Amino acid sequence: MNYLDLTTAALGLAYILLEYKASRWMWAVGAVMQLLGIVLYYQKGLYADCGMEFYYLAMTAYGFWRWTKALPPRGGDGEGPITHMPLRLAFLWTAIALALWALIWYLLSHFTDSTVPVADAFTTALSLVGIWALAHKYLEQWFVWIAVDVVTCWLYFQKDIPFKASLYALYVVIAIFGYFRWRRDLREAVV
């Protein structure tokens, strides 16, 4: 049994449940999960996922800061409101994600022994965009995570990381519910 797989899966479940609730404490749980994920992904040859954990650590600090200090507070809880991603940013970040996917795919194909460069690059590129959108508390970040979670579930089963793969299958369901909850919270804040 891979205890790193099991531990990061448990932390991941706590993380997404806190994200579902729009709680800033998800960032603290995420930091621990990312540190352990670096080791796990390196061991399994998922180099893009491993490298991305370093980016996630930086975004975790940024996200926690943004959710607690930079976003205007709502209702005195110290956490800013959920908003829509401006359309101009959606187009920009889609172009960035596609460019990153191509670049990471190239790097994995030519400079590593990765057996899954297309899928690994895809989930990495979208995750880079998704965590940024989450840090800004954009409702649409859930769509990014649903796509990432579906592909990652398949990828982790392929790489024999069953607990994390099962977690990503659960992530898909929670992300769908998370979208509807955040959308409801956004509508209630507007009214």
Image (tube, rainbow, N blue to C red):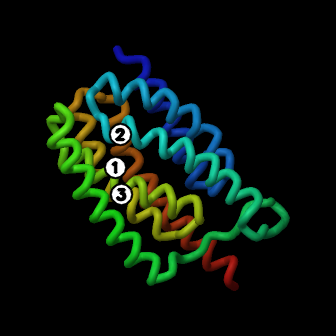
- Cβ–Cβ under 8 Å for marks 3 and 2: no
Q: Which residue is mark 3?
A: 126
- Cβ–Cβ under 8 Å for marks 2 and 1: yes
Please state the horizontal and vertical placement of residue 30, each as a whole percent of the image. Answer: 56, 40
Q: Please tell me whether mark 1 sits on a helix, a strand or a loop.
A: helix
Q: Which residue is mark 2?
A: 49
Q: Is residue 52 above or below residue 62?
A: above
> Residue at (42%, 55%) from the top-left corner?
128
Name the mark on residue 124: 1
> Is 159 situated left or right of 40 in this image?
left
Please state the horizontal and vertical placement of residue 81, each as a whole percent of the image. Answer: 68, 70
Identify the mark nearer the N-term, 2 or 1. Answer: 2
CA gap between label 3 and label 1 equals 6 Å
Nearest to the observer: residue 24 or residue 50: 50
Name the mark on residue 55: none
> Which of the 4 image quadrants contains residue 103?
bottom left
Please state the horizontal and vertical placement of residue 65, each as a whole percent of the image. Answer: 70, 54
> Which of the 4 image quadrants contains residue 157?
top left
